[in-house]
C-alpha cells in the first residue's frame, strides 16, 4: 500500500491541475467577455440586415404578341442585348407602304426638277427672242418713220415746184405714192412693234410657270419630309419591338412566356447589376446617433459564414421604416405600446463578390468608435 505521504502528494497534484485549468478557463472567458464588451461598445451590430440592389423592371413600350424570349432567369446580360422580341409583321407592312409612297414622291420630285430646268431654259430663250424681236421692230419702225419723213419732205418740195411747171404730173404722182407707201410702212412697223411687245409680255408671263412648278416641288418636298419623319417614327417603333437590356447585369425574374400578348408598360422581367449591390441595415433609433457616413463596417453573410466582407456606411436614412409601411398603424383606442423604431442605413461593399445575391441575410457590425 502507498504511504499516506505519497497519497497526499497525489491529491495535491490533482487539485493544482484542476486549479490551473479553472484559472485558464476563467482567463479565456474573461478575455472573450472583454472582447464582446469592447465590440458592443465600439460597434453597432445589426443581425437582420439584407443585401439590396437597384432592380430594373424591363417593360414593353408597345403592345403585341411575344414572339421570342432570348434569355432565361439567372443569365448574365450586357447593355443593349436583345431580351425579348414582339411580333412586328403589321408594322413592317406599314413601313413597306410608306417606303413605296416615298419612292413615288421622290420620282415626282425628280420629274418636277427636270420640268423646272426645261421650263427655265425655254422661257429664258423665248424671252431673249422676244426682246430681240421688239428691238428689231423698233428699229424697223424708226426706219419707216425716217422714210416717211423723207417722202413727206420730197412731196412738199415737188408740190412747191408744180406751180412753176418744173415738175411733171408723173413725178408728183410718184412722190405722192412714195409718201403713202412710207406711211403704210410706218403703220406696219408700229403694228409689228405692238405684236412683238405682246410676245415679250407673253414670254415674261411664261416665267410664272417656273414659280408654279417651284410651288408644286415645295409641296412634294414637304410631303417627303413628313413621310421621312413618319418613317423615322416607324423605325423607332420597330426597334421597340426588340426589347433590349438597359444595363449590364443579371436577369433575376421573367414574368412572361413566348406567345403571350403583352400590354404597353407591362413588366416583362427584372434585372440588376452585381456591381451595384449594397447592404441595408435597419438600425435602432437609440443607436442611430452613433452612425454616420464613412464609418467602416464588417459584413457577415449567412450563406457564406466562412468569409467576411468589408464595407463602409454610404448613407443614413431620414425616416424610419414604419413611415413606408403600406398599412399605417393608428392608435384610436388610446392604448399605446412604445416600440423602438428603426432607420435604414445603406452600406456599400468595398469589393463586391459575384456570389452575393439580392435578398440574402447578413449581419453587420458598424465600427462607431476606435
Image (cartoon, rainbow, N blue to C red):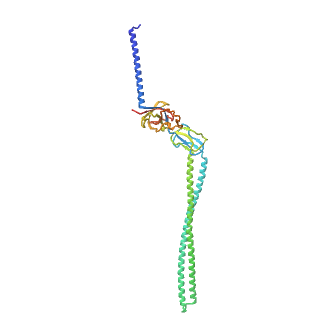
Name the residue at the bottom extreme.
164
Please say if 63 is above or below 212. Answer: above
The residue at 57%/71% (across/down) is 199
Name the residue at the top extreme.
1
Residue 274 coordinates in the image, percent (x, y)? 49, 37
Please say if 92 is above or below 120. Answer: above
- Figure disc tally: 0
Q: Which of the pair 359/168 is nearer the observer?
A: 359
Please say if 103 is above or below 122. Answer: above
The residue at 57%/51% (across/down) is 231
Give the quarter of the figure containing the N terminus.
Answer: top left
Name the residue at the front extreme.
334
Q: Which of the pair 175/33 is nearer the observer?
A: 33
Residue 103 coordinates in the image, percent (x, y)? 58, 55
Give the quarter of the figure containing the C terminus.
Answer: top left
Please say if 195 is above or below 223. Answer: below
Q: Which of the pair 336/9 is nearer the observer?
A: 336
Q: Which of the pair 114/297 is nearer the observer?
A: 297
Residue 234 coordinates in the image, percent (x, y)? 57, 50
Quadrant housing residue 203: bottom right
Residue 343 coordinates in the image, percent (x, y)? 47, 36
Amino acid at each position: 500500500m502507498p504511504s499516506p505521504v505519497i497519497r497526499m502528494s497525489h491529491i495535491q497534484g490533482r487539485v493544482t491541475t484542476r486549479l490551473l485549468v479553472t484559472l485558464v478557463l476563467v482567463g479565456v472567458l474573461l478575455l472573450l467577455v472583454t472582447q464582446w464588451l469592447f465590440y458592443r461598445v465600439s460597434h453597432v451590430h445589426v443581425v437582420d440586415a439584407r443585401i439590396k440592389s437597384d432592380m430594373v423592371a424591363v417593360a414593353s413600350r408597345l403592345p403585341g404578341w411575344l414572339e421570342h424570349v432570348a434569355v432565361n432567369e439567372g443569365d448574365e446580360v450586357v447593355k443593349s442585348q436583345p431580351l425579348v422580341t414582339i411580333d412586328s409583321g403589321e408594322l413592317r407592312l406599314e413601313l413597306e407602304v410608306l417606303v413605296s409612297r416615298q419612292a413615288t414622291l421622290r420620282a415626282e420630285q425628280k420629274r418636277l426638277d427636270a420640268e423646272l430646268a426645261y421650263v427655265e431654259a425655254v422661257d429664258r430663250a423665248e424671252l431673249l427672242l422676244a426682246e430681240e424681236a421688239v428691238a428689231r421692230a423698233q428699229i424697223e419702225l424708226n426706219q419707216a418713220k425716217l422714210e416717211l419723213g423723207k417722202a413727206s419732205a420730197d412731196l412738199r418740195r415737188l408740190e412747191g415746184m408744180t406751180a412753176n411747171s418744173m415738175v411733171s404730173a408723173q413725178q408728183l404722182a410718184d412722190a405722192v405714192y412714195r409718201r403713202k407707201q412710207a406711211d403704210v410702212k410706218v403703220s406696219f412697223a408700229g403694228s409689228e412693234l405692238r405684236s412683238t411687245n405682246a410676245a415679250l409680255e407673253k414670254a415674261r408671263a411664261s416665267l410664272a410657270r417656273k414659280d408654279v412648278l417651284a410651288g408644286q416641288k415645295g409641296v412634294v418636298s414637304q410631303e417627303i419630309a413628313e413621310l421621312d419623319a413618319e418613317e423615322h417614327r416607324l423605325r423607332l417603333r420597330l426597334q421597340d419591338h426588340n426589347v433590349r437590356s438597359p444595363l449590364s447585369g443579371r436577369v433575376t425574374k421573367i414574368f412572361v412566356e413566348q406567345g403571350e400578348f403583352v400590354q404597353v408598360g407591362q413588366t416583362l422581367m427584372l434585372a440588376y447589376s452585381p456591381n451595384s449591390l449594397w447592404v441595408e441595415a435597419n438600425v435602432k433609433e437609440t443607436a442611430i446617433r452613433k452612425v454616420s457616413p464613412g464609418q467602416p463596417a464588417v459584413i457577415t453573410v449567412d450563406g457564406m459564414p466562412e468569409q467576411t466582407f468589408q464595407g463602409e456606411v454610404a448613407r443614413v436614412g431620414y425616416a424610419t421604416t414604419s413611415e413606408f409601411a403600406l398599412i399605417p398603424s393608428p392608435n384610436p383606442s388610446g392604448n399605446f405600446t412604445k416600440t423602438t423604431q428603426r432607420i435604414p442605413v445603406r452600406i456599400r461593399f468595398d469589393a463586391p463578390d459575384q456570389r452575393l445575391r439580392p435578398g440574402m441575410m447578413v449581419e453587420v457590425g458598424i465600427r462607431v468608435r476606435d
